[in-house]
Amino acid sequence: MAIPHALPGQAVDVRPLGAGLAQEKTRALFKSADLEVMRLVLMAGKSLPPHSVPGEITVHCLEGSLVVTAEGRSHALGADQLLYLAGGVMHDVTAVEDSSALVTIALRR
Amino acid sequence: MAIPHALPGQAVDVRPLGAGLAQEKTRALFKSADLEVMRLVLMAGKSLPPHSVPGEITVHCLEGSLVVTAEGRSHALGADQLLYLAGGVMHDVTAVEDSSALVTIALRR
């Protein structure tokens, strides 16, 4: 069943999933006029293939360990670390450990 | 001394400040073309007075307990919870406990 997206002002739980991580999938928390926020779930050894979006993004690792590669440089991102990437930049993401992350995308209109 | 803002791809530590919270101040992590991200530090009983920004925002409570009031409704926001508000909405934020939060603002151009 699809999980309904959050409404403005509605608190959404984004705590680490811990032992429940393997049962979760990546899902959008909400998409509105200016922002889209999703929770990325990526198990160890898995990758998101190279892609880009028009607007800037932040990646906030909630648990585990990720490597974000953009413009020929790889950036390690551990739990409780955040990075941002400029809009239009091709990037890929690989999970070193079972991981989840908040991804915030600025939507350009 | 001003702390330099993060560059694209640079991992920024956003773990809870814990016992160090009282020694920290609110500061911007970065401001770029589409997004501004700051870490809000608000001690128990303190408030940000009502204000608005043109673009949408997310507030992600990293520790403590906040109340976000917007459009006549108050929203409790505990650690590891996130909410968003539409752009242009007057809101205020009060700390129930010593708190820090990531605030992401969509910049409208």
Image (cartoon, coloured by chain):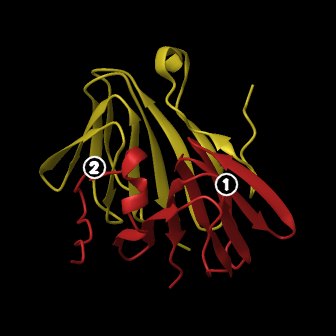
Chain colours: A red, B yellow
Q: Mark 1 — residue? A: A96
**Residue B91 — which label?**
2
How crowded pointer 2 is (Cα within 10 Å; few <14, some 14-19, many 20+) is rated as some
* Front residue (pair B29, B53): B29
Whether callout 1 and callout 2 share a subunit is answered: no
* Front residue (pair B60, B90): B60
Depicted B11 relative to depicted A32: above or below: above
* Front residue (pair A43, A8): A43
* Front residue (pair A39, B81): A39
Q: Say which element carries label 1.
A: loop
> Percent from the top left, x then y, of residue A39?
44, 62
Tell me what residue is drawn at x 55 percent, y 54 percent. Answer: A98
Tell me what residue is drawn at x 67 percent, y 64 percent. Answer: A94
Tell me what residue is drawn at x 61 percent, y 51 percent. Answer: A97
Depicted B1 relative to depicted B11: above or below: above
> Percent from the top left, x then y, of residue B84?
33, 58
How crowded pointer 1 is (Cα within 10 Å; few <14, some 14-19, many 20+) is rated as some
The amino acid on which the numbered mark 1 sits, given as a three-letter code, is: Val
The amino acid on which the numbered mark 2 sits, given as a three-letter code, is: His
Which residue lies most toward the right here?
A72
Would you say B71 lies left or right of A97 here?
Answer: left
State whether residue B32 appears in this view. Answer: no
Q: For the N terminus of chain A, which image quadrant?
A: bottom left
Image mark 2: chain: B
